[in-house]
Amino acid sequence: MKPQVQVGMMALALSLFFGYHAFYKSQQDRVHLIQAQSVEEQTRQRTQLEVVALAQRVEHYRHRLLQTPEPSVLVREVAVLAKKAGVQLSTIGQEPPQEFPQFTRLAVNLQCSATYHQLGAFLDYLEHAEHFIRAESITVTPGSDGRSTISLVVSSLYVPPLLDGQPG
């Protein structure tokens, strides 16, 4: 081959080599950077959506907690639910509120009379009440007339609102 052709081919090869690295490779690097930024942004947006969804769930559950540390609110709600279920309350006693660092436990002792089905309905109403109410203990003494005497302790929680910037 002629030296001029060889030099021309070398120049062409060098031009292609430098062109590849100067233009194509830099463009490929930019494409990879943009793809990585796109994935990062999608991840950030997905995380933001998850945080919003979690905040909504927290607010939903916070709404189910009592809004005041007053046991009388729990007493009223339990009395309404008992009446709705046909349970006959004989005594309702408030336990003193138990204060913990992050919440206050409120409890009520009940003595009542009910049939099996009324008791089941009452427990179901408690479980599905507007506020979170927990049946902590129950003692059932069967009666001769189809009604049982029931001792029941129910409780709920009051969590004070969090101040901005302070951990819960």
Image: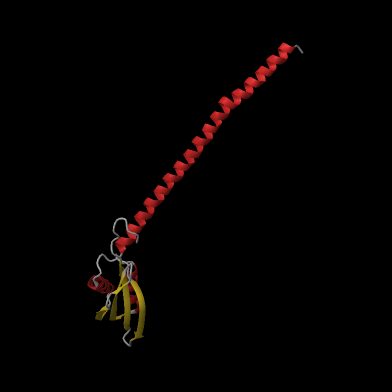
Q: Would residue 118 be visible to someone looking at this image?
A: no
Determine the residue positioned at 69% across, 18% down: 10
Residue 117, given in percent of the width and then of the height, sits at 34, 76
Q: Quadrant of residue 84?
A: bottom left
Image quadrant for the C terminus?
bottom left
Of 105 and 53, which appears nearest the observer? 105
Residue 17, given in percent of the width and then of the height, sits at 63, 24
Determine the residue positioned at 39% across, 52% down: 51
In this rendering, the answer to whether 96 lies above or below 7 is: below
Determine the residue positioned at 65% across, 21% down: 14
Of 133 and 90, which appears nearest the observer? 133
Q: How many marks?
A: 0
Q: Quadrant of residue 18?
A: top right
Residue 93, given in percent of the width and then of the height, sits at 25, 80
Of 114 and 94, which appears nearest the observer? 94
Determine the residue positioned at 35% across, 85% down: 141
Of all residues, the one furthest to the right in this rendering is 1
Q: Would residue 155 be visible to someone looking at this image?
A: yes
Which color scheme does this rendered protein use? secondary structure
Image quadrant for the N terminus?
top right
Of all residues, the one furthest to the bottom in this rendering is 144
Residue 121, given in percent of the width and then of the height, sits at 33, 72
In this rendering, the answer to whether 3 lies above or below 81 is: above
In this rendering, the answer to whether 160 lies above or below 54 is: below
